[in-house]
Amino acid sequence: MKLWKYSLWLSIFSCILLFIVFYLTPEYNVFIWRQFRLDAGILFAVLLLSWTTALFGFALNNVFIDKALTDKNIKMPANIKCLPSILGVPSFLSFIWFIYRYYKGNPHH
């Protein structure tokens, strides 16, 4: 049960970080576009932390689900068991968005 709680907290923390990134003003950037190069903005570190916590939450939740399959004493509905993994989906989608924006290039040109 500890694994499930840890994975839930990590997934919630990941979602909170994504909400912070989403609601910040436009002067905070993920990318700093230059003429011939690309630099990481201040929000890159926050996104990296969000992706990392979501990945650890997902991994811990998978370990918990594997243990729950073998241990008959854990009585939990399936949707509650998978809640930390579901909460990690926004972080994975933001990673896909990041890769897409990186390869798409500078939006101002």
Image (cartoon, rainbow, N blue to C red):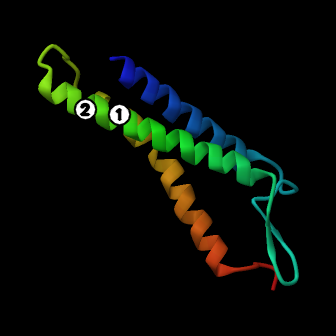
Residue at 50% in and 57% down:
93
List the residue tagged with mark 1: 61
Per the rendering, the mark at residue 18 is none
Between 9 and 21, the one nearer to me in the picture: 9
Q: Residue furthest top?
A: 73
CB atoms of marks 1 and 2 within 8 Å:
yes
Q: Percent x, y for residue 103?
A: 62, 78
Q: Badge 1: few (under 14), some or many (20 or more) residues near its Cα, within 10 Å? A: many
Question: How many angstroms separate mark 1 from mark 2 (CA)?
Answer: 6 Å
Residue at 45% in and 28% down:
8
Q: Percent x, y for residue 66?
A: 22, 33
Mark 2: which amino acid?
A: Ile
Mark 1: which amino acid?
A: Asn
List the residue tagged with mark 2: 65
Under tag 2, what secondary structure?
helix
Res 53 seen here: yes
Residue at 58% in and 64% down:
97
Q: Is residue 44 above or below residue 12?
A: below
Q: Badge 2: few (under 14), some or many (20 or more) residues near its Cα, within 10 Å? A: some
Q: Is residue 69 above or below residue 101?
A: above
Res 78 seen here: no
